[in-house]
Amino acid sequence: MQDQAAAEASHKDMANAIRALAMDAVQKAESGHPGMPMGMADVATVLFTRFLKYDASHPEWPDRDRFVLSAGHGSMLIYALLYLTGYPEMDIEEIKNFRQLGARTAGHPEYGHAPGIETTTGPLGQGIGNAVGMALAERLLSQRYGSDIVNHHTYCLAGDGCLMEGISQEAISLAGHYKLGRLIVLFDDNQISIDGPTSLTISDDQLERFRASNWHTAAVDGHDPEAIALAIENAKAVTDRPSIIACRTVIGYGAPKKAGTASTHGSPLGAEEIAGAREKLGWSYPPFVVPEGILKSWRAAGARHRSDFETWIEAAGRLDASSRARLTDPVDEEVRQGIQRAIAAIKIDFAAEGAKLATRQSSQKVLEKLLPVVPGLIGGSADLTGSVGTLTKQHGIIKPDDFAGNYIHYGVREHGMAAAMNGLALHGGIVPYGGTFLVFSDYCRPSIRLSALMGQRVVYVMTHDSIGLGEDGPTHQPVEQLAALRAIPGLYVMRPADSVECAECWEIALLASDTPTILTLTRQGLPVLRNAPTDENLSAKGAYVLLEPEGGRDVTLLATGSEVTMALDAAKMLQGEGIKAAVVSMPCWELFEAQDESYRDASSARHPGSGSEAAVEFGWQKWLGPKGAFIGMRGFGASAPAQELYKHFGITPEAAAAAARDLIVRK
Amino acid sequence: MQDQAAAEASHKDMANAIRALAMDAVQKAESGHPGMPMGMADVATVLFTRFLKYDASHPEWPDRDRFVLSAGHGSMLIYALLYLTGYPEMDIEEIKNFRQLGARTAGHPEYGHAPGIETTTGPLGQGIGNAVGMALAERLLSQRYGSDIVNHHTYCLAGDGCLMEGISQEAISLAGHYKLGRLIVLFDDNQISIDGPTSLTISDDQLERFRASNWHTAAVDGHDPEAIALAIENAKAVTDRPSIIACRTVIGYGAPKKAGTASTHGSPLGAEEIAGAREKLGWSYPPFVVPEGILKSWRAAGARHRSDFETWIEAAGRLDASSRARLTDPVDEEVRQGIQRAIAAIKIDFAAEGAKLATRQSSQKVLEKLLPVVPGLIGGSADLTGSVGTLTKQHGIIKPDDFAGNYIHYGVREHGMAAAMNGLALHGGIVPYGGTFLVFSDYCRPSIRLSALMGQRVVYVMTHDSIGLGEDGPTHQPVEQLAALRAIPGLYVMRPADSVECAECWEIALLASDTPTILTLTRQGLPVLRNAPTDENLSAKGAYVLLEPEGGRDVTLLATGSEVTMALDAAKMLQGEGIKAAVVSMPCWELFEAQDESYRDASSARHPGSGSEAAVEFGWQKWLGPKGAFIGMRGFGASAPAQELYKHFGITPEAAAAAARDLIVRK
């Protein structure tokens, strides 16, 4: 049901306010995208004045409807809406400062810049994936909390570009499978892309494609407010399928000469065209001025769910404090302590059992202990469940009609999985993790980057982390992925050396409230190296001395993951020759970098040093210097049993020992 | 029309030969994927004995039908087919050595390991993208050479996993748009993925989805040879649309207990199950033995197009030598000389004009000169044509019914574009290049990796290569992409400093017959630094001294791309203070690494040195040492005008000069 129109100003005036702000801000900034906001102003006005459940004064209301601007280049649309409806921190000065240094109004919507921006968008198709995650989160939490606490819709505005990106297929296929009836995509069907009319590049029947994925579809005139409203009402009434409404719009609507053309997409309209648009739209006000009556109507729209908000607050007040807190922060103090206790216990168990385990197996055992203490933990994998160890006996499977479980079969959709995990995390209440092979981090890299840019606690479980994968060969053996991931700012890339480190890395990942983590894990078994685990999380320093020879060092052997065992073996060989080698395990470079220089110098990276990692050397010079020895890969891998590959590529204790001897001679 | 059955052995026996070889080889290797080859054996037998145009003795026949095994994990299918039909270099010993070090029979099909392997597959969905490229290449070359020279089909075998990957949507949408009627996808519709039945994860109507993208579709029993044959005949008859045939198969067909289950997908069946399969299939022969009669029939199938091949040779004999050569190698000696002349000329022009140009603009000017001398050059962009400068006045647009042009509007499909470019290059006769923003290299990274792994001459034109992009903000500003791409083995990552270097980089890219290149180019204008260009391609050494101070160096300033100008400005400042700074431009690290040590030491990287690049430091320590100064980014960018961003992030001549002073003090 649509809300009573709260406004006295006409729909046309209200929509034109968006158009005017968009064209004026882009003009002043001398860059930006006026076409989409002008084209979708009618749809957005209908949504924000009649349907979207939000209270501009309480943007953090957990049960608000989510609005995702997947076509993020049209950022002025959301900025205009936030300003008009009266969100905090979005005054007219911000609009005037569009795209300027330090403004909340960045070129594309940046999560965290202002309340009401639900996710960072711009890289096309990501927003649809986020929206699927948010809609999933809503179902999961509604099942847990009840519909008086969690009961909202997720709206996503997407353009042709979003729908052409492959990630959109993964997202819509996933959403259709899970019957996410509260997800409604508003497709800006303007038939224009940057190169020109979409007919240049695409002949798809988009709605047929969505229907093939179990979606409800509709097509409307995107400039007819009543038709739009009816379509949204109908979409809301379809509860067993997600909905897409193709809104046939004119890009740059109102621009007298440029409307309907690619030239309105990504450049200022120019003074003359803007003057013409003002005339054509009947908008006679100066730049950045929204007359009081129109603004008042918008503000009323922004406040029209105040009583719903208050009712919700009352309902939430009946929850216990901990449940209420976890609705937004899934790792509150109690959960945090539970994690710490569980990790401490399993570290002792791992050490006591001393079993040789692949870290993917250790990770599975850790998860089994974590699940009972982290109710918000939602796992999954991209169709490699058995291989990556993401499913435990503690899990229940999430199914299309049953959201009580905590494990998602994401299918062969790494990119869709990662974008959905961003949405799950952004929604609040959930800590998502998902697994695939490390080499396929490439398939979801754009979403991993956004996890980092947005500072979201998303845990990527990426196994088969080297040539140790063996026979599947070079297409499946990561050699450059560790380096490529370490290059992303704001991301923890962890490569634990044994079960104990694996447990420690999980602890770090779950407690890192604003940093995503990649856990890279082995296929092959590794001995327990930390036989006497400390209470302290040694991995939290990023690197630490695992073996310190008596009487000073001749050489330091740095290593990560499976190659730490090799470094220890090499140190033993060297010891037999009277060479004193220390071994430093480096599970997380980023955390090590964050230590103070005295720790870094004293604990680990003293020269001469060698590095061992079954991956390319790229980036290792930071720790080794340009002449430092490196034992690792020089190029792509090969297909053969893992042990043979290690020999073939010269990644052996013997090679590590020989390199150390050379270093000492050269010193 | 299907060919006359050349065989005397029954279809069943011939298909069972594939099944037996697959299950035996996987069993012996103790790893691998028997399920798909056993399931698709009937379809493959029909294709290779009745339809596929090939001559096993002449695998390099340019007009052969292409067969792409997109579901690359089923590699034993293609190995069995190549052995059975009598391809060179694929004897029974290779089959027995499946997945062993040095064997041609790698875990996944590796391009270059044996004739008949048209592309490296395994990362799902890539093969479909390659096949679209190959089918496009066929149309392009057929238009140029005539149908007596180029007139073939492209067949692609894809599984559920391929179709779930987002890249498949980009590929099928592109193929449907271009009406690639000679592309036929055989979908292994076994309804099983690794996690279990596909119903766990997907509810799509795949064929409806393909129809939405303008495909002809059909569904058949994948174990009924006549039904399969009829469907392929019908698909061949549909010439204005690509075709997909959903072949309903039983994964692991023949395995008595495991058939139809996920357990046949990726593990050996085990001795008992194999014995049962032999009985059930009526295949009583020992492992790796194919009875002579059956082998003879297979060999006859492999030779049944001999006369077509000979007819083709005759027709090709009427071509001039150069055209004939370029059908496979688009850069023959004449083209090579043309490139060199064009580049030499434009270097002189650039220097003489001295115009400040963004390297994306320089690249466009270079392309304009290259197109007339490289007939096989086929350009395009992922809907950023105007921004990335990939289209020139010399181009004609390739359209669905007109393949005379040489420019493809790929649409917003970076991944599909890259995979199609791999297919265009693999086909022979074409040098593909395609453009997008550098930050979106992440969207096509899996295909870039395969360009490198396969050693294909694919040129990626990636512009807006730093915060110099400006207002679009951090989602669009690459900071880690240079490092992430440099980490990929076998790939040239080039960042020219001015127009002259840009021309040199294009020359290197086009002459690098077995290496892909990423050209990273600026949005912003750069002055000409090489005012007196040499005949020698200085960029070909990867790095070179651009400014050598008189009387020895105090410090060396290394830089790439737009930051070379900054380094020169810093050197000038330092000169005023009596500090002698050399400036080294490093357009391509990989080429510099390939120089001998004396060149590297003498020409450039002498300590103390600083590095300047508007990107993260990751990887720079190789040239600078761990204590070397770096002027660049520490994290993600921001939204603001480019010049302000450079100041904000401290990437200025002043900062570079200050860092140099510090280095000298610390020395």
Image: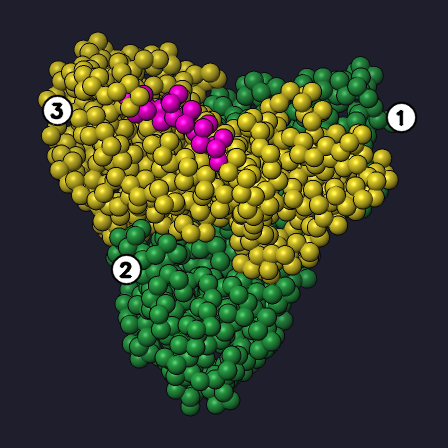
Chain colours: A green, B yellow
Q: Tell me if residue A285 is in the magenta stretch.
A: no
Q: Which chain carries label 3?
A: B
Name the residue that disc number 1 marks. A551
Mark 3 Cα shell of 10 Å, populated few (<14), some (14-19), many (≥20): few
What secondary structure is marked by label 1?
Answer: loop
Q: Mark 1 lies on which chain?
A: A
Mark 2 Cα shell of 10 Å, populated few (<14), some (14-19), many (≥20): many
Quick one: which residue is furthest to the right in this view?
A551
Residue at the spot x=65%, y=44% of the render?
A: B565
What secondary structure is marked by label 3?
Answer: loop
Q: Tell me if residue B331 is in the magenta stretch.
A: yes
Location of the N terminus of chain A by quadrant is bottom left
The picture places residue B457, in percent across and down from the top left corner, at: 43, 30
**Residue A559 in view, yes or no:** no
**Residue B216 in view, yes or no:** yes
Residue at the spot x=18%, y=30% of the render?
A: B147
Q: From mark 3 to mark 2, how far is it between C-alphas?
A: 40 Å
Name the residue that disc number 2 marks. A207
Name the residue that disc number 3 marks. B3
Residue B418 appears left or right of B603: left
